[in-house]
Amino acid sequence: MTAGFLIASAFLASAVEFVEALTIVLAAGITRGWRSALAGLGAATLALAVIVAALGPALTLIPIDVLRLVVGAILVAFGLQWLRKAILRASGYKALHDEAEIFAREQAEARAAGNEERAGLDWYGFTLAFKGVLLEGLEVAFIVITFGSTQGSIGLAALGAGIALVLVAVVGVLVRGPLTRVPENTLKFSVGVMLTTFGIFWSAEGAGAHWPGDDASLPGVLAFVVLLSFGAVVTLRRRRVAFA
Amino acid sequence: MRRIRAFGMFWWDFVVGDDWRSAAGVAIALGVTAALVAAGVNAWWLMPAAVAAVLWLSLRRAAAG
């Protein structure tokens, strides 16, 4: 797999999660004050950095075939979840993810919450930002660790995630609102395709199979998953129209 | 105990999600791939086929429900 492929995968997956985290931090900051929201953001970022720094090197100690089997299996299961939701959204069976609606809901809940101060911080604002960033960030950490360790290059995967973080943060500061124009379903569709592709490739290798042409077969697997996914969208759309 | 359960539920939801049958299908397909490889068959083709079947069945269930 090329370095570009690895960086692009980590970038896309991370961008989706960072957009969702940004929505939560904005809701916390605007309604409960920026000091607490930014403290929550900083604490969660630190926790995520510790998780990546601790688990990343530990995973590289596991034999590569075992790692590929386990990581591949998890990635296929994980990727199928993303792909399934993205296909259902694209074919009209599930409502599209709406950042503006989520932002409004988070703001309403934050306004309704009581005031409690701890360590000089508004505790609701701090925990809202902390939990939001930690939960969304865990998916990023998971992807960076699994992609990076399986390919022996956590640095490149972290680079992709870092670029996404900077990009989303800069755009978030400029827009000062939820990033509603990000084509989130398209991004999620792409991430689902990539996770599933790498999962199929690595898990089969981990189980002892040899791909024809080794790494050169990866684009073939990618093309297969793309065709499969688009085929599913077209079929489900037709089915929906037929039953409407 | 509640925290351990919540931790377990988080990871279950994180990896398996709302369709455990898909995760089970993936695990079975990997087991069969390993068994075929042990029997001397280079079964690289099994995982793509299994993923196609698992995804389609999962989508059919979701669309029907």
Image: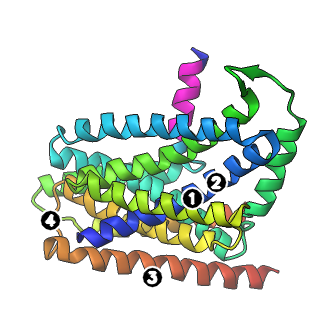
Q: Mark 2 points at which residue?
A: A22
Determine the secondary structure under disc 1.
Answer: helix
Is the residue at mark 3 from the same chain as the one at mark 2?
Answer: yes
Question: Looking at the picture, which amino acid does disc 2 mark?
Answer: Leu
Can you say which quadrant of the picture contains the C terminus of chain A? bottom right
A200 to the left or right of A192:
left
Question: Looking at the picture, which amino acid does disc 3 mark?
Answer: Leu
Give, as a single range, the part of the protein colored magenta: B3-12
Residue under mark 2: which chain is it in? A
Depth check: give the residue in front, A236 or A22: A22
Is the residue at mark 2 from the same chain as the one at mark 4?
Answer: yes
The crowd level at tag 3 (other Cα within 10 Å; few <14, some 14-19, many 20+) is: few
Do the residues bearing badges 2 and 1 touch, measured as CB atoms within 8 Å? Answer: yes
Q: Mark 3 points at which residue?
A: A227
Depicted B10 relative to depicted A27: above or below: above
Question: Which of the two labelled residues, at mark 3 and mark 1, occupies the earlier sequence position?
Answer: 1
Q: Name the residue under label 4.
A: A210
Q: Mark 1 points at which residue?
A: A169
